[in-house]
Image (tube, helix red, strand yellow):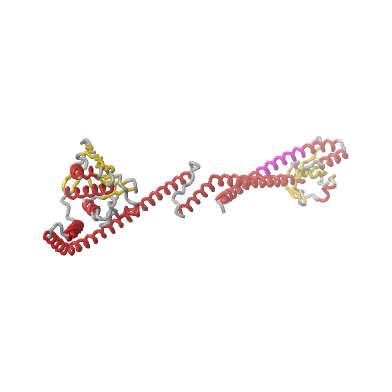
Amino acid sequence: MTLGTRLALSLAGPLVLVMLLFGYIDQRTSRALLHDELAREGRAMARMVQIAMEDALRDRQIEDVRALVDKVTGYERVLGLRIFDNQGTVIYQPPDLAAYPFASAGALKTALERGTPSENHSRLGDQLVLTFIVPLRDPKGQILGALQLLQLESYIEEDARASRNSIATLTALMILVTTGIMFLVTRWSVERPVADLARSFREVGSGDLRARVPVRRGNEFGLLAQEFNGMCERLEESQRSLLNAQEERRHMEARLRHAERLAAIGRLAAGLAHEIGTPLNVIGGRAERLLRSLRDDEPATRSLRIICAQMERIARIVRGMLDFARMREPRLAKTDVAPILGKVLEFLGQRFEEVRVRVVASFRDGTGVVLADADQIHQVFLNLCTNALDAMPGGGTLRVSAARVEKHHPEGNGEVLPFVAVTFEDTGAGIPLENLDRVFDPFFTTKDVGRGTGLGLSISYGIVREHGGFFDVESEPGHGTRLTVYLPGTAEARDTAPPRIAS
């Protein structure tokens, strides 16, 4: 059963009771008024007939008396008239009254003996009548007889019946009108908002938190719709936060696995370096000894030089593996990254000129004050600049900048912290998208054979992570690479010094 139907039925019951009470009170009031009106009319008619009868009897005009009786009997509310002599005998009555015997002997006796008129209610057959008995006197005041006037009360019942029918019709009409109004009102003011809410609840239940309820009015349903929309917005925000937290957790787990993999590779590298180092030194020493014992023009000399060069390359790889595996604890001190960047760019200045790479450096002295090991940070910046050089063999532009920023640490608790961001942006070939997640893996490199070991970025990653920082890599094949190092900043960093621009 719909809400509109329940409201209509709940209103129909009290409405019927009110109308019944109203009809009962109205009927009783109308009946009392009609009885009073009928009594006044009966008394007036009895008095008028009494006077006419006394005049006719005084003049002994019996026919006039009969004519008057017949005439009054024909009146719509009068059942009939009876004329009695002074002994109480009926002198004349209409033929219609013959079927109803006289039954008011006491009232007739009082009227004949005392001359007192009377009126009472009685029933003749199935008809209610109001009976009036009045004495008839001569001019001297002597009682000549009496007359009985029988007035019908049935029309009062007919009027009451008509009133009941009118009230019933009015009640039914009011119920129909009320039901129609309630249906329309509940249809537009209740059922539509409830349907909107139900639809939105279904959508939210199916997982669509973007569902919203239209706010059509400023009433309670509008307030409910606003609260529901607010709840959906909060749920949607919570869902986004949960998804972000899950994504952050996934990245953290990936970084943890990466760190564990690096640690395992470091242990492996340390073992391999130790095992390879000793026989490598023996082989290298014997090759150099043979090379010194031969003349330059002998055919074996060229082969021994090649062997020595490759042994030196293997030695460099082993030293890199040892550096990666035996990374020392950083000696932290307040360090400004600007002088370190200046030294690195100055050290590689000749190589920049040889490969026609233009350097655009923008950083402020004092801006990048961090708590770091200057030597290790120098190694990180040197590795990143070297990688940028190798990515632009045909020339290009390297932009180096440092600035203070506030950022969330990827492995932190979401708190915004101050960092010094050092950015290296080249215009080289870029890194394919499928290789972005592997650039910090040991021995992974996109350089040509013989131009790199793939340990530079791995060592740099370990150093920056030991300092509490992190990397951010952006690259697009054919448009270069942007690599940013984030190092935790200190309170001494300030932006008052003018920027240093070098190119």
Q: To which quarter of the image does residue 273 belong? A: bottom left
Q: Is residue 498 magenta?
A: no
Nearest the eye: 392 or 59: 392
Q: Is residue 33 magenta?
A: yes
Nearest the eye: 376 or 286: 286
Q: Where is residue 289 in the image (x, y as percent from the top left)?
A: 12, 61
Q: Give the range drawn in magenta.
A: 28-45
Nearest the eye: 106 or 368: 368
Q: Position of residue 489 (x, y in %)?
A: 22, 45
Q: Which residue is drawn at 51% across and 48% down?
A: 196
**Tag count in the figure?**
0
Residue 432 visible in the current orientation: yes
Q: Position of residue 449 (x, y in %)?
A: 27, 55
Residue 55 versus residue 416 in the image, above or below: above
Secondary structure predominantly adopted by residues drawn in magenta: helix
Q: Position of residue 218 (x, y in %)?
A: 48, 41
